[in-house]
Amino acid sequence: MYRVVDWGGLAGAYAARLLAEADHDVIRIDPPGGDLLRRTGPYLGDSPDVERGAFHQFLNAGKRSFSLNLGSASARPVFMELLQQTDVLVATEPLSISEEELTAETPNLILVVISEEAEVCTMARSGLLSLTGQPNARPVVLGGHMAYLAVGTYVVVGIVAALRVLAQTGQGQVVRISMRECLETFVEQAMVEYTFSGTKNERRGNRGSITAVSGALPCKDGHWVISQINRPGRWEKFMEWVKDSELLADPSLALDENQRIQKDFIMDRILPWASKQTKSELVEEGQRRHFPASPVSTPLDLVQDPQLVARGFLKEIDHPKLGRVMFPQGPVATVRGQEMTPAPWLGQHNADVLAELGYSDEEHITLVEVGAL
């Protein structure tokens, strides 16, 4: 088990959360009044305080909270002592303590420095924003701060790679993660498509661009997704299901190149057919016929999903502030069968962390009095 100090923004916090799911000791550094992550809405129970932010409750689950005022001269030595007993420090630029100072006394430390920018600016510069939204309309930013969470997966990959090097060599290192460069990888398909065929991927709204007949379509009780892969005999099987007279009247649509030319016409013909059925009916029949299909799940659908409960991703827990709630354990914890503790309240583990560093109760009181905690 490694010790990880989480001093990052949303991307770093998600990476640290994944490490907590793997049962590593993760200590979140919180300023005494709470940070931006704790103040990122929405709030559970509609009470806007630093303990009820939904992102805080998820991203900080399984961690310990150490409230430390790094603007205080008395706090700096405590922080550096903590780093001497730490394997990984996850930090987001700009650093209030220089990289040189952080690594000078901790040669075995893995320092992860994340370069974050404003979410909408990074999505725009990476090219990702050009692909999201309705055709001939404004680009649309992904919801739920997904850009930061996607970057967090790259951060944890970098940490795991650095930990393997640490185990083999005993040497720490600096790992640099660029949010923009991470997001650029999600545009690789569009870049490859243009490089080899000259095709420009443009915003398709709720319609797909990889296969001609694909997208999220409205139905009786919401939306569903279909992706009709063009292979020999597949179009005919699709028509056996849809039974649209105009599509059946044109046998040339069985060819992939003709489907691509007529993709909007095809999707427009499918709309009235799908609108008469529920997403469950469409998805179950699509899967029975071996067509990739899925419901477009709402958050309410997910928290009531029997599959997520059966697999252990969602577990009912007794939350000290929210009562009995269904809580997402997370992908790594689900696979490992790891029980995730609720997100800590601000400074909950100050006494424990200070005791581990060798501070007495009297010294703890002094640090509080001088504004270090």
Image (cartoon, helix red, strand yellow):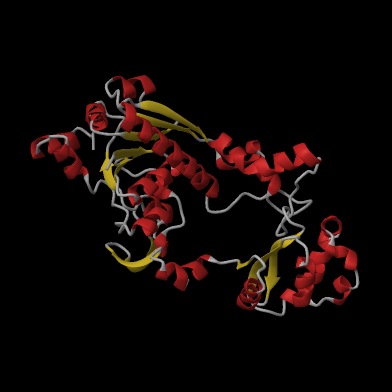
Residue 360 on image: x %, y % = 9, 37
Is residue 36 in view from this perspective? Answer: no
In the figure, 74 relative to 267: above or below?
above
Q: Give me the residue at 27% from left, 37% from top.
A: 68
Most foreground residue, 63 or 107? 107
Residue 162 on image: x %, y % = 39, 33
Most foreground residue, 12 or 234? 234
The quarter in which the N terminus is drawn is top left
Q: Give me the residue at 27% from left, 34% from top.
A: 86
In the figure, 118 relative to 23: above or below?
above
Is residue 249 in view from this perspective? Answer: yes
Left of 325 or right of it: where is 184?
A: right
Residue 345 on image: x %, y % = 28, 52
Indicate the quadrant where residue 315 lies. Answer: bottom left
Left of 138 or right of it: where is 372?
A: left
Left of 155 or right of it: where is 134?
A: right
